Amino acid sequence: MFELQFILAGVATVASYLSVRRFVRNRLRFVDAVHKRSTPMITGVAVAAVALPLAILPVITWPMAVLAGVGTAAGVKAGRRDINRRLNP
């Protein structure tokens, strides 16, 4: 059971990172709020807060919810960096 939870935590982290990075880079490139310093932290905490109630399920644990928030915050930051590189080569 522990191996399954470990794999699911890794998948949740990587999937949230990749999907959020792509979304920020493609859809939010003209939104000024993405470029604020606090945006990655706010989105990461929001995702973790939404995912924490799912921790009552037997397969999903609270570290998995926190890692999904970390992946989301990192994805926002990476997407923002991609936008800056594209606009300022």
Image: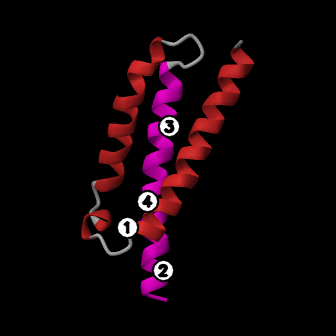
Q: Earlier in the sequence, mark 1 or mark 4?
A: 1
Disc sitting over residue 85 in the figure: 2
Q: Earlier in the sequence, mark 3 or mark 1?
A: 1
Circle 4 Cα neighbour tier, 10 Å, few/some/many (<14 / 14–19 / ≥20):
many
Q: CA distance from mark 4 to mark 3?
A: 14 Å
Cβ–Cβ under 8 Å for marks 3 and 2: no
Q: Which residue is mark 1?
A: 28
Cβ–Cβ under 8 Å for marks 2 and 1: no
Placement of the N terminus among the 4 image quadrants: top right
Amino acid type, callout 4: Lys
* Mark 1: secondary structure: loop
Looking at the picture, how far across and down is residue 77, in whole percent?
43, 59
Which residues make up the magenta segment?
Answer: 62-89
Q: CA distance from mark 3 to mark 1?
A: 20 Å
Q: Which residue is mark 3?
A: 68
* In this picture, residue 1 sits left or right of residue 82: right
Seen at 29% across and 60% down, the residue is 37
Disc sitting over residue 77 in the figure: 4
Seen at 42% across and 28% down, the residue is 51
Amino acid type, callout 3: Ala
Circle 2 Cα neighbour tier, 10 Å, few/some/many (<14 / 14–19 / ≥20):
few
**Which tag is nearer the camera, tag 1 or tag 4?**
1
Q: CA distance from mark 3 to mark 2?
A: 25 Å
* Mark 4: secondary structure: helix
Q: CA distance from mark 1 to mark 4?
A: 12 Å
